[in-house]
Image (spheres, helix red, strand yellow):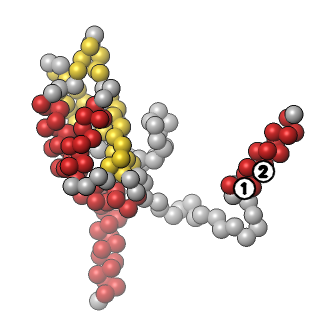
């Protein structure tokens, strides 16, 4: 029985293309891939009778939309602050109730951007450090920092202008 499961797994690897073929192209590990997740800087939001730090992660529908979302992050922050200030985060037994917070701010965030670019919002209690890398405690793997994305878009624009001249 054990041998049969090994053959089944190997067959699935071949069908899915996971097994190395002689003529297959390997991806360059140094090649930069634009992420679909944007980590916003932490925000102090009203909860009960105090303010608490909350970090939001936005998931774009496509990687090419990340740049457009990053350009409008100040509008997104304003929309979140306005929504949460109208109805603060609930506190029960000295604990934050974050359930449903993502659904509450989903509409205002997409309206602030102007289109439905964001498909999901993740909420993390506390101030999560900005940066890129793998975070095992989060429901996704890659986090994109808007500063780096906007910097690379400016560099591409400058290169395109230089190529035209």
Question: Residue 15 has which mark?
Answer: 1
The residue pinned by badge 2 equals 11
> Decide: marks 2, 1 in contact (CB < 8 A)?
yes
Q: Position of residue 147 (x, y in %)?
A: 30, 55
Question: Residue 138 has which mark?
Answer: none
Identify which residue is drawn at 29% across, 35% down: 103
Residue 126 sits in quarter: top left
Identify which residue is drawn at 25% across, 34% down: 104
| In the image: residue 155, left or right of residue 31 | left
Work out which quarter of the rendered image holds the C terminus and state it. Answer: bottom left
At label 1, counting other C-alpha atoms closer than 10 Å, the crowd grade (few under 14, some 14-19, many 20 or more) is few
Identify which residue is drawn at 30% across, 29% down: 100
- Where 127 sits versus 115, above or below? above
* Residue 149 in sight from this viewpoint: no
| In the image: residue 9, left or right of residue 161 | right
Q: Position of residue 30 (x, y in %)?
A: 53, 62
What kind of element bears circle 2? helix
- Where 9 sits versus 158, above or below? above
Residue 93 sits in quarter: top left
Which residue is at the front of the view, 66 or 105? 105
* Residue 14 in sight from this viewpoint: yes
Identify which residue is drawn at 73% across, 60% down: 20
């Amino acid at each position: 029985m054990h041998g049969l499961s090994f053959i089944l797994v190997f067959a699935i690897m071949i069908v899915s293309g996971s097994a190395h073929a002689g003529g297959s192209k390997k991806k360059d590990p140094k090649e930069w891939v634009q992420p679909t997740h944007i980590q916003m800087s932490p925000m102090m939001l009203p909860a009960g009778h105090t303010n608490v730090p909350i970090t939001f992660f936005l998931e774009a529908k496509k990687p090419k939309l990340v740049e457009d979302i990053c350009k409008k992050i100040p509008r997104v922050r304003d929309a979140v602050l306005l929504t949460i200030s109208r109805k603060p985060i609930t506190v029960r037994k000295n604990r934050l109730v974050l359930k449903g917070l993502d659904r509450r701010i989903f509409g205002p965030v997409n309206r602030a951007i102007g289109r439905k670019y964001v498909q999901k919002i993740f909420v993390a209690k506390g101030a999560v450090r900005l940066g890129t890398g793998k975070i095992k405690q989060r429901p996704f793997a890659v986090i994109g920092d808007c500063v780096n994305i906007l910097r690379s878009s400016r560099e591409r624009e400058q290169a395109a202008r230089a190529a035209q001249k």
